[in-house]
Image: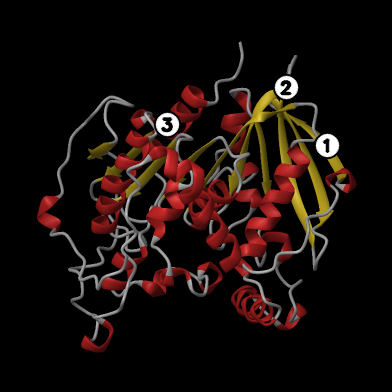
Amino acid sequence: MRRHHRLGLPWSLVFFAIAAPGATAQVRVTPESARGGTTSGEPWAVVPETFRDLDLPDWPVPTDLPRWEGQGRAEVRSTLLELLGELPPRPDPGRVEVVSREQHDGYSLERFRFHNGVDMVVPGILLIPDGLTEPAPAIVGLHGHGSSKESICTDEGHGQYVGPMLARKGYVVAAIDAYFNGDRIGKGPGGVNDDKLGQEHSLFKLNLWLGRTLWGMMLRDEQCLIDYLETRPEVDASRIGATGMSMGCTRAWWLAAIDDRVDAIVGVACFTRYAELISHGDLRRHGIYYFVPGLLDHFDTEAIYALVAPRPMLQLSGDEDGGAPLDGIEVLERKLQEVYALHGVPEHFRSVVYSGTGHEYLPEMKDEMVAWFERHLPVEE
């Protein structure tokens, strides 16, 4: 079912409350450390008239669990995979090469690499907690646009630096450089002629010519990483989580949507619904890598998030983040509450919005992230 959307809840509907973790699916928090961001303004205020009547999909929230689990969910996932394009088979994870190992405070750090079987060597980092006596849960760390695996695992001054904290709590942590980031810059189809942004654009164009999407290839690399984690004796392959900020947040929920091996996710600063992103004139806030041709012929992001249910999902957002407009967050909260309630596990979905906060990763968010994984992917004592 489709209809024309003229979206945008008034910002006056925002409410703020302090709630205990897990008390409600929707929480509005005013953190002491909130630094403020950039509001995306009133819906449609800057959008020219010629773009205001787009025919955007109105995806109906499922109300019949047997029908959703028997056919509806499979249809959404099949559509999603088809839109990502003809992705090549993934390589043998047994061919991953560990290139170095070093000891740190509470964990060891391994550097590894693998050829993704298509076009590039993928470098990665694995953090292994000290003293493991049995396989532990693993967390896939997904870096943001313009950062790298180092941001998560080695760069202590970076806002996305969470890997060692998780490792010291007993989690195996894994992170790779995504296409056009980190050690993969300069290794795209334009070679050294392309800077980071040029490489992103070249990869996007080339993959379209080849009948697939750059976004699909990025997700495929993360699936290669999960394939590798399943071979590691330190990892409990039945307990794998994913978390990231910004581009990493979006990769986390897309990855969980297409791959059931992801058992729980925490997303930071990209709980985005596309209709509201358009209505605020904020498409520029996301890189071209992220756009999948034909998606809005079928559904908006609530259908993708719904594929994650009933697995635990926590989303942490700022109310002034133009990349994830607040009115879109509110639509997603309402719809996903219904989806998780349909599965009988409303407590497995939680959304926290921080007042006066833009596109940032607050210390409070890191505390929430850790608590979510400790609740849903606990490390055995």
Q: Residue 155: percent from the left, percent from the top? A: 61, 46
In the rendered image, which quarter is residue 174 located in?
top right
In the rendered image, which quarter contains the C terminus?
Answer: top right
**Is 364 left or right of 377, judged from the image as shown?**
left
Residue type, label 1: Arg
Name the residue carrying label 2.
135
Residue type, label 3: Asp
In the rendered image, which quarter is residue 163 located in?
top right
Q: Residue 110: percent from the left, percent from the top? A: 79, 39
Q: Nearer the viewer, mark 2 or mark 1?
A: 2
Label 2, residues with CA under 10 Å away: few <14, some 14-19, many ≥20: some
Q: Taking the image as drawn, is residue 70 in sight? A: yes
> Who's the residue at 33% across and 26% down the image?
21
Q: Which residue is nearer to you in this view: 251 or 82?
A: 82
| Residue 129 to residue 76: above or below | above
**Is 240 left or right of 16, judged from the image as shown?**
right
CB contact under 8 Å: marks 2 and 1: no
In the rendered image, which quarter contains the N terminus?
Answer: bottom left
Q: Which residue is nearer to you in this view: 78 or 20?
A: 78
In the displayed orientation, state which residue is furthest to the top: 381
- How far is mark 1 from mark 3, CA to CA? 29 Å
Label 3, residues with CA under 10 Å away: few <14, some 14-19, many ≥20: few
Q: SS class of the residue under badge 3?
A: helix
Q: Residue 349: percent from the left, percent from the top? A: 37, 36
Label 1, residues with CA under 10 Å away: few <14, some 14-19, many ≥20: some
**Is 28 left or right of 105, judged from the image as shown?**
left
Name the residue carrying label 3.
367
Query: Which numbered disc flags the more N-terminal residue, 2 or 3?
Result: 2
